Amino acid sequence: MHQRVEAPLFDRRPHHWYLPNPLKIYEFEQLVAGLPPMDGQGRDNALLDLGCGTGLQSLVLARRGWAVTGVDSDPSRIEKARRRQRSVRGADNAAFVAATLEDAMLPTATFDAAVSFRVLEHIPDLEGCLAEVHRVLKPGAAFHASVDCLGNVTDQDLRDRHHRDYAIHRLFDTATAPGYFERQGFVVDECRAILKGPRAIEAFRSSWSSVRRLSLEKVHPVRALRREDARTTSDAGVMLLLRMHTPSVRR
């Protein structure tokens, strides 16, 4: 269908077609903004997707030219990502590994960038995982991550249900989140809340795995989330966005 009907729009904004939920689209746009440019020659474009799940974001980034390695500890999700890859044009430069990052044994200083979409709050040994991310990144490489915060969610029943249903090990906040990464050698460039207003809270209440919508039905909610964040002065949000990098010289 993408090849026959949707190709022009899909090529410009594949995440609008492919990601199932306006919240995920907004998260994706915010997280990938500012990733280092690629040289267009197939060099300096190796990217790690930590906790890639079923490969949605990995494949969008592969279509944009990144050589993506998606790592996830759930073999069933990796198998679904591989099946999905076969139906997506221009995503041959993605590879998927069924393992924890520590068990994947990826070579040191391999990647020019890494991303992680709401994964780190689920990892019991966060310090070990971040140390491994640092090891596989090249000096000066970027690492962008989104994490659960729930700083603007005051409904305790909703917070408890989120912990229970999604196996949350920790929630992050703007005051303490940078320390997790700095202790593993990252330089934190930005840590800020996103999805800060009532529309975002209600969408979170309705669950992140909402029914798929056509792209045009997702455009207005994504724009509304952008406007809501722009005019909300509070630094409390459903999620935190962190942008950081490894030092240019390894310790």
Image (cartoon, grey):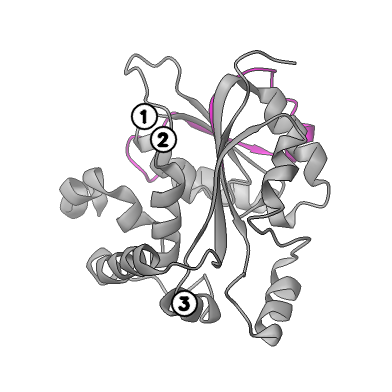
Quarter of the rendering containing residue 246: top right
130 drawn magenta: no
In this rendering, would 240 be left or right of 76? left
The picture quadrant where one finds residue 111 is top right
Q: Could you tell me which residue is drawn at 68 percent across and 58 percent down?
A: 172
> What is the three-letter code of the residue carrying label 2?
Ala
Looking at the rendering, in which quadrant would you find the C terminus? top right
Front disc: 2 or 3: 3
In front here: 34 or 84? 34
For residue 203, the mark is 3
Nearer to the camera, 178 or 86: 178
Badge 1 density bin: few <14, some 14–19, many ≥20, Cα 10 Å: many
- CA–CA distance in space, label 2 to label 1: 5 Å
Disc 2 secondary structure class: helix
Range of residues picked out in magenta: 87-115
Q: Is residue 57 above or below residue 233?
A: above
Q: CB atoms at circles 2 and 3 under 8 Å apart?
A: no
For marks 2 and 3, give the CA distance.
28 Å
Quadrant of image for the N terminus: bottom left
**Residue identifier under label 1:** 65
Q: Amino acid at mark 1?
A: Gly
User: Can residue 89 be seen by looking at this rendering?
Assistant: yes
Residue 155 drawn above or below residue 188: below
Which mark, residue 62?
2
Check disc 3: other Cα within 10 Å, few if <14, some if 14-19, many if 20+: some
Q: Position of residue 64 (x, y in %)?
A: 34, 35
Q: Nearer the viewer, residue 107 or 141?
A: 141
The part of the image, by quadrant, that contains residue 207 is bottom right
Query: How far across and how far down the image is residue 59, in percent?
Result: 43, 42
